Image (tube, rainbow, N blue to C red):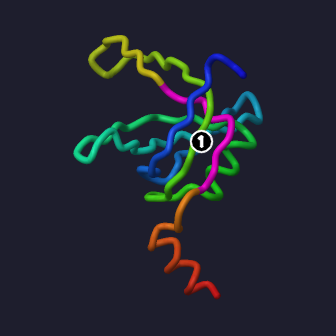
């Protein structure tokens, strides 16, 4: 078993954002999931899925969908608009499972398409 492995159960906060790169064929899907800490607390976790994983995320993940995400914990550093360096943890997704029912908005779309 790898030492740097995380598994989170939560709900997708919004549809994933696709990032494409001009210099390569790599694709990146970025999204966040809400993970319940307790009855009154929710922690938001940023997740990145690359290439084939990104394609699957874009196909199956919609706002409100319950998922299990597993991957590697990483640090993402950037300079914010105030010029300060910010470092925050993210999960580099290596796999996932869809849980529970589809959100109602997905079910309604599926019903109208048939």
Quadrant in which the C terminus is drawn: bottom right
Q: Is residue 114 visible?
A: yes
**Residue 82 in the image: above or below residue 8:** above
Q: Is residue 19 visible?
A: no
Q: Which residue is at the front of the view, 11 or 15? A: 11
Q: Residue at x 73, y 28 (%)?
A: 23
Point out residue 91 in the picture as x, y percentages from the top left corner.
54, 30
Residue 99 in the magenta stretch? The answer is no
Q: Which residue is at the front of the view, 80 or 13? A: 13
What secondary structure is found at the residue carrying circle 1? strand
- Range drawn in magenta: 90-98
Q: Residue at x 52, y 58 (%)?
A: 62
Q: Residue at x 52, y 68 (%)?
A: 101
Q: Is residue 97 left or right of residue 102?
A: right
Instruction: Find disc 1 in the rendering and name its residue.
Output: 29
Q: Which residue is at the front of the view, 71 or 30? A: 71
Q: Which residue is at the front of the view, 2 or 16? A: 2
Picture quarter containing residue 99? bottom right
Q: Is residue 11 left or right of residue 38?
A: right
Quadrant in which the N terminus is drawn: top right
Point out residue 46 in the picture as x, y percentages from the top left corner.
46, 34
Decide: few, some or many residues near mark 1? Use Cα within 10 Å; few <14, some 14-19, many ≥20.
many
Point out residue 12 in the picture as x, y percentages from the top left corner.
46, 51
Residue 95 in the magenta stretch? The answer is yes
**Magenta stretch: dominant SS?**
strand
Q: Residue at x 65, y 58 (%)?
A: 59
**Residue 85 in the image: above or below residue 47:** above
Q: Is residue 103 left or right of residue 70?
A: left
Number of marks drawn: 1
Point out residue 107 in the picture as x, y percentages from the top left corner.
52, 76
């Amino acid at each position: 078993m790898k030492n740097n492995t995380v598994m989170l159960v939560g709900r997708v906060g919004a549809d994933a954002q696709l990032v494409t790169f001009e210099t390569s064929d790599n694709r990146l899907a970025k999204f966040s999931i809400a993970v319940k800490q307790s009855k009154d607390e929710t922690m938001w976790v940023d997740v990145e899925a690359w290439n084939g994983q990104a394609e699957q995320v874009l196909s199956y993940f919609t706002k409100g969908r319950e998922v299990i995400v597993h991957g590697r914990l990483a640090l993402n550093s950037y300079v914010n608009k105030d010029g300060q360096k910010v470092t925050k943890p993210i999960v580099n997704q290596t796999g996932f499972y869809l849980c529970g029912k589809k959100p109602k908005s997905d079910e309604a779309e599926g019903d109208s398409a048939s």
